[in-house]
Amino acid sequence: MVGVVRFRLARGRRVGNLRAWGIWRVVGFGIAAALFAGPVPAHAMGGSVVDTIADIAAVIVLIVVPAGAIYLFWKVHVLPEVIAEKRHHPQKEAIKTLCILSLFFGGLLWPLAWLWAYSKPTLYKLAYGTDKHDDFYKELPAGAGSPVEQISRVRADLERLADSGVKAEDLKDLKRELRRLENKFAGPGGKEVD
């Protein structure tokens, strides 16, 4: 149970739970204990200790906090670029440029870069026949090739198997793979969409 704390006396007898006491009783008890605590003199620490603490606090506030804030601001503003790289977005250079501009304009353009990095480039796919950056195909293992090459390879495999007398039922998986590649990388019929 969330928020239920059991209290026991020294002999182990149960007193009740926090809900039965009421949260206001506990808060009131805490305030009363703070008010009736003994006074603490203002000169409890020596002057040199207070000066040392003040010097450390000044260094933290004047140097460490601004440096950390600048670093955090920079890391957050290049995050869309990292996302675009990871997703092989075809317009990742433009997203990178928008991230740099966002740094100079105080973050006003950052939401646009974030949305752009997560968007699926459907119009780009219609125009260029792929929704991945060229680097994606450079990173593919040897022999994988571009989408058009993959489709032609699967078609050639299909024709070769059909010519060798393989039953049509056995070619279902290969035909399904061909349809998947055509739908994913190219337009109908396996031709690049212009």
Image (cartoon, rainbow, N blue to C red):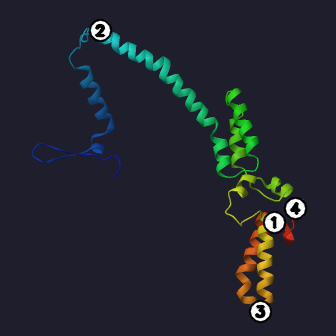
Q: Which residue is mark 4?
A: 193
Amino acid type, callout 2: Ser
Residue beneath label 3, please? 165
Query: What label does residue 148 carry, if any?
Result: 1
The circle drawn on residue 48 is 2
In the displayed structure, 2 sits above or below 156; it is above
Give the amino acid at mark 1. Answer: Val
List x then y, in percent, for residue 11: 9, 46
Label whose residue precedes the other's in the sequence (1 or 3): 1
Marks 4, 3: nearer the viewer: 3
Mark 1 and mark 4 lie on one chain; the one further toward the N terminus is: 1
Q: Residues within 10 Å of mark 1 (few under 14, many from 20)?
A: some
Contact (Cβ within 8 Å) of mark 2 with mark 3: no
Residue type at mark 3: give it: Gly
Q: Quadrant of residue 33?
A: top left
Residue 12 location, x and y as percent?
12, 48
